[in-house]
Amino acid sequence: MSSSTQAQRIVLAARPQGEPTATDFRLETVQLPAPAAGQLLLKTLYLSLDPYMRGRMNDAKSYMPPVGLGQTMVGEVVAEVVESQLAGYAAGDLVLAHSGWVSHALSDGQGVRKIDPDTAPIETRLGVLGMPGFTAYAGLREIGKPRAGETVVVAAASGPVGSLVGQLAQRSGARAVGIAGGTRKCAYVKDVLGFDVVIDHHAEDFADQLATACPDGIDVYFENVGGPIWHAVFPLLNPFARVPVCGLVADYNGSAAVSDGLSVAGLMRGILSKSITVRGFINYDLDYCFGDFLKEVGPAIKQGEIEHLEDIVDGLENAPATFMGMLKGKNFGKVLVRVGERR
Ligand code: NDP
């Protein structure tokens, strides 16, 4: 049927030392053959850029293997089926796939999921109604377990995970205290997302402001960031507080302070004496909640009860710079790269 397709991809050219730089990535052009029997040819519409990708650039043991040098950077996409040689799919279908940082990909259908553009805007499937939104929902429901009247604190509060954590906490009757970087993000968290309080972590008296914002202590701290924010939060945790450990973005470039006054012994003493629950999780550990997530959060988004924001950049070639910016807080909302247009 079709002939070969010229595709672009971004590969890992070098392993970053600290912050990634442009030379750690390489844009390549490749020819993809026509799909064979059992294959799909996918055209990327949106590529999701997520903080976890920084960890995949390291040659280190983790919950997933690293990206190899010269290999395509990993990532989830919304794609259009251009040509199908796989039963159950037709040209024009829209799907979620793990194609990585590419304009086009061949797939055998593994990990591919059809999406219906009439139920929700397709870009939300990579954000509030996708992996980050699910992470917020599942971590809060299964580990945070907020109750009415409790105080829930979350940092990176304007991003796709944090923004949903705070809004869901409030739907449980809890107070939501957001932490974000800069005036614009803080205004959004307070005025649009409707958090009860927001604090700028760049403020010199950040720890004092946090204590003032939490006069009854902290019952749930949804950990997205680590570093100095964790140090300000820890003394404020109440007995029986719950800490879903979701991410440590302040440390992904290896820049967090090594010694800042909270020893392992001090940490463990606090956890013991206050009966605190600290539990790390990767979203797929909790995938048994996914059906409930779609049932509860999907309609709330459709009815405009849950706010969300996408930060969309055009062009695959801009993915590296956008990704590097996100790790430094330059994004404003869920980071997506618009790679191609729907036919
Ligand atoms: P965001 O879109 O919110 O982007 C990351 C944000 O982190 C930045 O915008 C910035 O916001 C903040 N940040 C970066 N560096 C620092 C720093 N040094 N100190 C304080 N804040 C900083 O990200 P997501 O919503 O996609 O992800 C949030 C967290 O959740 C990440 O840690 C991510 O790795 C984790 N995650 C974990 C998953 C899991 O399965 N466990 C799944 C998905 C995400 P600001 O400018 O407001 O500070």
Image (tube, grey):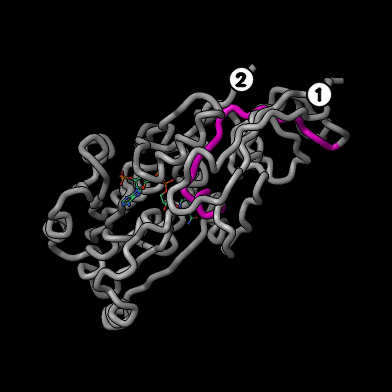
Residue 44 falls inside the magenta stretch: yes
Q: In this view, does 101 lie above or below 69?
A: above
The answer to whether 342 appears left or right of 155 in the picture is: right
Which label was assigned to residue 189? none
Label count reads 2
Measuring from the top left, give residue 251's x and y in whole percent.
39, 58
Closer to the chain start, of discs 2 and 1, is 1
Name the residue tied to disc 1. 4
Q: What residue type is labelled 2?
A: Arg
Q: Position of residue 57 (x, y in %)?
A: 56, 51
Left/right of residue 192 with respect to residue 243 in the rendered view = left
Q: In which quarter of the image is the C terminus?
A: top right
- Taking the spot 46% from the left edge, 56% from the top edge, the residue there is 138
Left or right of 145 in this view: 135: right
SS for tag 1?
A: loop
Q: How far apart are marks 2 and 1 (CA)?
A: 19 Å
Write down the region rendered in magenta: 38-56
Residue at image location 47% in from the left, 42% down from the top: 21
Up/down of 217 relative to 41, above or below: below
- Please name whichever residue, 129 or 20, is drawn nearer the observer in this view of the structure: 20
Q: In this view, does 105 lie to the left or right of 63?
A: right
Figure quadrant of residue 25: top right
Q: Is mark 2 on a helix, strand or loop?
A: loop
Q: Are marks 2 and 1 in contact (CB under 8 Å)?
A: no
Q: Is residue 1 inside the magenta stretch?
A: no
Residue receiving disc 2: 342
Up/down of 72 relative to 277, above or below: above
For image coordinates 26% across by 65% down, the residue present is 231
